[in-house]
Image (cartoon, rainbow, N blue to C red):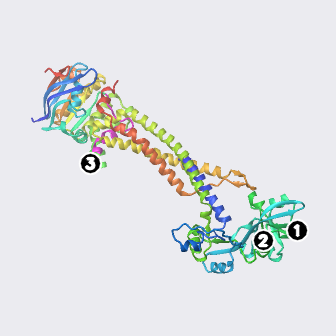
């Protein structure tokens, strides 16, 4: 029983921890600069169900992005329980003291970004607000700063993919604990980013935080219908990972169930031994006038009592195991910080574990109980004195 | 006196590689209030006959009529009900439930019958135990009782539901002389004073001589 509670606690705990990290650290909904379904071309509209080939077509070069983002932000502000921030992301090369590294630039409005991301919480030096006063400032991760050997107040040169070059001053350092982020992300004012990336008045995503994260999928669909751009909820974005977690849970549950099967065999053996030892008493009860199903009931009840006793012992034992596990600290691969083993203390897993334990006990007791019910009193009474 | 128990052409065979005939075409009539002894050598079929008459075993052929009704056609549940309400068993070894006290052992058949309240069951059980001079041993476990005392508790248990029929399989076979005499006297009184039918399987000629009728059995057949 404690194995199930223990296993369920780890499964649920890590799943909840993963979801919490996703919900806390990722946008709940992201409006991206693309459409869910490609625009239907005029030729397809003119010749429905026909195979149309247009030769020598030269697609127009356009600056991809969300152009009317101010209107969208205004619309989003009308929705209750929702905060949004427009972001322009792009790639650039960072150059400092001869070291060149690729970096993901995130141009944003400092007042807005603080409300929808946890970046401010991860600031170890400086503040996101410093970008308001210093438009030529940049915030980088500690890992990136370490690789570039730069610190607060140093200048770095950024070169965009369009060839634009600008010098920025490091005004803040952040540390999320995930080295992939700390070594590759940089934040700056949105206007500067638009200038550097040659995308004036364009953003490529609008990130949204809502007070009810589990409704992100429905709300995202609603917003998508209104604004036209594709909305990606955190659930949609992490579906593969969630499926992986579900598969992992099923595997772990199967392993824990195997422990339960072994325990059930133990109960079967106990009750079978009792039935063998009590054959004479069963014969007496039958000779007195007890029914076969009453005899069976006695041993099934014994199984239930064993199951309940297992629960009474297993719950505190499971709690001790879970408590012990929750104290384990570890540093997962790719993380720069130490985290505690995530466990869940939910009541439901104990209820499920108890239910499983009692059901397994009843099933394990049923077979020997049936054997007890089939005892022929004459066979026992004849040889009982021997 | 009316016929309470009747066996007609009763036979019991054990099937197997070597078939064994336990009871061979037995016909018996036992009257109400009669004290009957079944005697015979070991392996002659005395106990087998008793188990058949007590509905613990099913005959291969023939009929058993209890109060004029053929009980052989009944299912196990009805037979259990009949054993509970109409038949009391006493075995050579007392066969008391070891975890239960003398009182609880006697209460058991009454609780199973479910006709009396708990307080009435306890009161009646105590009465029966007192009548068998076991008042000092009511709350003792079987392992705290002597052989004779245990057998008297077994008699009390057999009498609990006021059965028509008491069947005893060598009830004195495992007792010392004094206890044996005492049990013989009690069983004789059960028939004489309470008007119950008592069928006893015994090796003891002296005990058999107390009976109103002696059935002698050899190789599964009644001789006299």
* Circles 2 and 3 on the same subunit: no
Q: Is residue B142 left or right of residue B194?
A: right
**Front of the two marks 2 and 1:** 2
Front in this rendered view, residue B127 or B40:
B40
Crowding at dot 3, Cα within 10 Å, few <14 / some 14-19 / many 20+, comes out as: few
SS at circle 3:
loop
Front in this rendered view, residue B185 or B32:
B32
User: N-terminal of the two: label 2 or label 1?
Assistant: 1
For disc 3, the marked residue is: B116
**Front of the two marks 2 and 3:** 2
Q: Is residue B94 magenta?
A: yes
Subunit that carries the residue with mark 3: B
Q: Is residue A377 magenta?
A: no
Q: Position of residue A63 (x, y in %)?
A: 72, 73
Q: Is residue A2 visible?
A: no
Q: Position of residue A168 (x, y in %)?
A: 85, 70
Task: Give the distance between the C-alpha atoms of the residues marked 2 and 3, in whole angstroms.
Answer: 96 Å
- The tag on residue A153 is 1
Q: Which residue is at 46% across, 40% downward?
A: A267
Which residue is situated farthest in the front direction here? A55
Subunit that carries the residue with mark 1: A
For disc 2, the marked residue is: A197
SS at circle 2:
loop
**Front of the two marks 3 and 1:** 1
Task: Give the distance between the C-alpha atoms of the residues marked 2 and 1, in whole angstroms.
Answer: 23 Å
Task: Give the distance between the C-alpha atoms of the residues marked 3 and 1, in whole angstroms.
Answer: 96 Å
Check if mark 3's residue and mark 1's residue have beta carbons within 8 Å: no
Crowding at dot 2, Cα within 10 Å, few <14 / some 14-19 / many 20+, comes out as: many
Residues drawn in magenta: B93-112
Question: Image quarter for residue B10?
Answer: top left
* Circles 3 and 1 on the same subunit: no
């Amino acid at each position: 029983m404690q194995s199930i509670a223990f296993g369920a606690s780890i499964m649920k705990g890590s799943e909840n921890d993963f979801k919490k990290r996703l919900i806390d650290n990722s946008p709940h909904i992201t409006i991206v600069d693309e459409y869910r379904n490609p625009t239907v071309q005029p030729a397809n509209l003119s010749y429905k169900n026909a195979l149309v080939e247009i030769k020598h077509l030269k697609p127009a070069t356009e600056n991809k992005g969300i152009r009317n983002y101010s209107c969208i932000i205004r619309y989003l502000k009308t929705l209750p329980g929702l905060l949004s921030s427009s972001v322009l992301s792009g790639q650039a090369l960072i150059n400092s003291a001869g070291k060149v590294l690729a970096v993901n630039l995130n141009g944003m409005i400092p007042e807005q970004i603080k409300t929808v991301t946890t970046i401010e919480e991860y600031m170890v030096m400086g503040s996101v607000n410093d970008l308001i006063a210093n438009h030529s400032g940049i915030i980088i991760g500690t890992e990136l700063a370490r690789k570039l050997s730069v610190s607060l107040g140093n200048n770095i040169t950024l070169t965009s993919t369009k060839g634009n070059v600008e010098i920025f001053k490091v005004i803040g350092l952040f540390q999320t604990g995930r080295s992939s982020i700390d070594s590759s992300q940089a934040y700056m004012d949105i206007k500067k980013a638009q200038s550097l990336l040659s995308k004036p008045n364009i953003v490529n995503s609008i990130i949204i935080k809502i007070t009810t994260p589990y409704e992100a999928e429905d709300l995202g669909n609603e917003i998508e219908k209104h604004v036209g751009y594709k909305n990606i909820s955190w659930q949609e974005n992490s579906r593969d990972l969630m499926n992986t977690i579900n598969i992992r849970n099923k595997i772990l549950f199967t392993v824990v169930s195997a422990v339960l099967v072994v325990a059930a065999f133990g109960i079967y053996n106990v009750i079978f031994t009792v039935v063998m030892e009590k054959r004479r008493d069963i014969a007496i009860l039958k000779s007195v006038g007890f029914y076969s199903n009453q005899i069976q009931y006695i041993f099934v009840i014994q199984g239930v009592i064993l199951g309940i006793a297992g629960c009474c012992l297993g719950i505190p034992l499971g709690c001790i195991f879970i408590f012990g596990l929750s104290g384990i600290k570890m540093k997962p691969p790719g993380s720069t910080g130490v985290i505690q083993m995530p466990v869940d203390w939910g009541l439901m897993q104990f209820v499920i574990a108890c239910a499983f334990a009692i059901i397994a006990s009843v099933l394990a007791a049923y077979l020997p109980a049936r054997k007890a019910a089939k005892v022929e009193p004459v066979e026992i009474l004849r040889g009982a004195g021997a | 006196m009316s016929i309470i128990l009747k066996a007609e052409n009763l036979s019991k065979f054990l099937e197997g590689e070597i078939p064994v005939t336990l009871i061979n075409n037995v016909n018996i009539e036992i009257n109400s209030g009669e004290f009957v002894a079944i005697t015979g050598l070991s392996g002659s079929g005395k106990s087998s006959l008793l188990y058949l008459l007590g509905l613990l075993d099913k005959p291969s052929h023939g009929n058993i009529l209890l109060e004029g009704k053929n009980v052989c056609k009944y299912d196990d549940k009805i037979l259990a009900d009949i054993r509970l309400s109409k038949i009391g068993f006493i075995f050579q070894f007392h066969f008391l439930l070891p975890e239960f006290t003398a009182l609880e052992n006697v209460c058991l058949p009454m609780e199973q019958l479910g006709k009396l309240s708990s307080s009435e069951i306890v009161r009646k059980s105590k009465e029966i135990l007192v009548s068998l001079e076991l008042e000092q041993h009511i709350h003792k476990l079987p392992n705290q009782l002597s052989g004779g005392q245990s057998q008297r508790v077994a008699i009390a248990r057999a009498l609990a539901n006021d059965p028509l029929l008491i069947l005893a399989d060598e009830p004195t076979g495992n007792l010392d002389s004094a206890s044996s005499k005492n049990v013989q006297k009690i069983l004789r009184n059960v028939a004489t004073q309470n008007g119950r039918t008592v069928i006893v399987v015994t090796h003891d000629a002296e005990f058999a001589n107390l009976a109103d009728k002696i059935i002698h059995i050899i190789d599964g057949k009644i001789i006299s």
